[in-house]
Image (cartoon, helix red, strand yellow):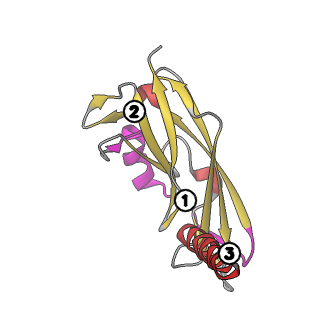
Amino acid sequence: MYARARSRVVIALLAFVAACAESVGPDGMQLDIALDKNVVSISDSVHLTLTLSNVSPAPIRVVPADAYGVCMHAFQAFDAQGRPVTPPSAFCIMAASLIAPAPVYLAPLERMTISDWWVVGQSHVDLQPLTPGVYRVRGAVGPAHSAERTVQIVAQ
């Protein structure tokens, strides 16, 4: 009985370590995501709050938090088939290529909070508007990715 309980504790500990390791990128960045809602109307938006942490012993060069939002997004979304959702930013791609934000350095153990919006009604998959269903969303800042969250999009 004691051996079985001990093996459960070891398995739980290994699962915890694996889950933590998934959110820490190879460059020492950890990214966490929070959504203001998990169910949203097709005509509404989802507010995303991302926390980027430097868990390495050295400073890391990153894009500043205020650069995300309208032109550059700190998240990725996917439909039920795994196809990428394209949020609105087509006009900004040209502007961003001309005026790139100056990078900043995140010191060891320092955190940065990024605020972003997913405007559902202006997003599309393969040039088609989004339809009601379940979508997966994850934070994406450089090579760092957060755990995925689901968002249920409902008709108006």
Q: Which residue is mark 3?
A: 5
CB contact under 8 Å: marks 1 and 2: no
Dot 3 crowding, Cα within 10 Å, few <14, some 14–19, many 20+: few
In the picture provided, is 106 more to the left or to the right than 14? right
Disc with the residue nearer the chain's start (2 vs 3) = 3
Q: Amino acid at mark 2?
A: Ser
The answer to if 105 sits in the magenta stretch is yes
Dot 1 crowding, Cα within 10 Å, few <14, some 14–19, many 20+: many
| Residue at position x 44%, y 51% in the image | 96
In the picture provided, is 126 more to the left or to the right than 116? left
Q: Quadrant of residue 146?
A: bottom right
127, above or below 17, in the image: above
Q: Which is nearer the eye, 139 or 135?
A: 135
Q: Which mark is residue 146?
A: 1
3D distance between C-alphas at marks 1 and 2: 21 Å
| Image: magenta residue range | 84-110
In the picture provided, is 7 more to the left or to the right than 112? left
Q: Amino acid at mark 1?
A: Ser
Q: Position of residue 15 (x, y in %)?
A: 58, 71
Q: Position of residue 119 (x, y in %)?
A: 49, 31
